[in-house]
Image: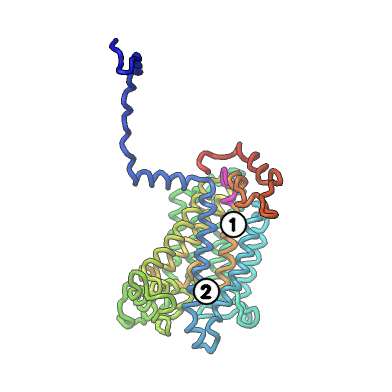
Amino acid sequence: MPGSRTGRPPVQRATGRPAATRTPQENPLLRLYTRGRRAWDRPLTAYYLILGGSLLITVLGLVMVYSASQITALQMSLPGSYFFRKQLLAAVIGGILLVAASRMPVKLHRALAYPMLAGAVFLMALVQVPGIGVAVNGNQNWIPLGGSFQIQPSEFGKLALVLWGADLMARKQDKKLLAQWKHMLVPLVPVAFMLLGLIMLGGDMGTAIILSAILFGLLWLAGAPTRLFVGVLSIAAFIGAVLIKTSPNRMGRISCLGATEPQSGPVDCWQAVHGIYALASGGLFGSGLGASVEKWGQLPEAHTDFIFAVTGEELGLAGTLSVLALFAALGYAGIRVAGRTEDPFVRYAAGGVTTWITAQAVINMGAVLGLLPIAGVPLPLFSYGGSALLPTMFAIGLLIAFARDEPGARAALAMRQPRFGRKRAGGAMLDRGPRRWNTMRRRASAARTSGER
């Protein structure tokens, strides 16, 4: 072995390692999809979607109610913030109901089912008593509470049908009675038809459509056979067709589909056409908050049934798509809660609430876009109206309570730590020992799922 220049023997080098094969760089889109998939699979995804989505819809709805109702209030010689203040009061009360419903145990929700149904039926029957019920826009479905406050009992009938129907179907499933068609239909369908009859006595077909959607949603979740489901749907469609054919007002609303001029036919399509005008003039980002032109007396019900049109005019396509995305997230979260639970009552109640909110949102937006007849139903959590907001927020509280009980959700909530675990005193950080949440974290570590961080 030849010596080196320094006179020292050369150092024998280790045998070279094989060159590591470089893996091809991961596709950024695939990486983004993987991260998104992991985020969707986390236990608290539905909880955050329901809580955050509903709060964002409610807050944005308050802003748009204030913007869309100012001109109407001034035309009625009222303060410009009149409708906004009433909606804000309803939102505060609804927030209390939401928190209360989210903290209630499932047993208490089931115990409220029958009293709530009885109360809704009583109030809906009371609407038809002369001297008590009040007609608004041709529909007699309101009860005055004194002053400018009124209540619409049919809105609470939706919540009552969801809770009572979920409790009924859950008890029948526990007794293995849903395999028989008579137990699946009775008494759910007769009671639902009774509620529909009370609603139709007042002429409110829009609310009747939402109630029918809840009924079919419960039957679908119960696994109704196709023939049975189609049979009930055919009967409801036939009754609806008769009611529409015998009412010139409802026939006129159907004839306004696709109208581009207010007087394009024998029926006045003023509201439908000006709703399209408002959306068309909004452009991509809208004319600016408060800068709507159609709300200056051109668009009827600008702050109630057609608030989505004012949103499109002031916030543009970006604003309407944001509202649509929030409702889509809320619907996805509700379906996920209903699909992951093992409790039949939770499955039926979550599915009924999700059907109610999504169906009502689709019908309202479809009417504003000119794709569906104008049904006179508000946009959930968004339009003006305390009678619609209160039961809807209670229903959102139900979904939040059910989402907290998802597999792994309680453990994930227990593992959350406050941001500040130490207190500062005299400029120095004093460690007062382990906190209570550290103990909770150790207890919940065994139940931690692989998808939660």
Above or below 453: residue 79: below
Which is more toward the observer, 453 or 449? 453
Q: Amino acid at mark 1?
A: Leu
Which is more toward the observer, 14 or 283? 14
Which quadrant would the N terminus be assigned to in this image? top left
Which residues are the magenta region? Answer: 402-409
Picture quadrant of residue 367: bottom left
Above or below 322: residue 453: above
Q: Is residue 106 left or right of residue 379?
A: right
Give the structural element (helix, strand or loop) at label 1: helix
| Residue 442 on the magenta segment | no
Reading the image, the residue beneath label 2 is 384
Which is more toward the observer, 244 or 6? 6
Q: Is residue 124 left or right of residue 232?
A: right
Q: Position of residue 261 (x, y in %)?
A: 31, 80
Q: Amino acid at mark 2?
A: Tyr
Q: Position of residue 327 (x, y in %)?
A: 46, 61
Reading the image, the residue beneath label 1 is 398
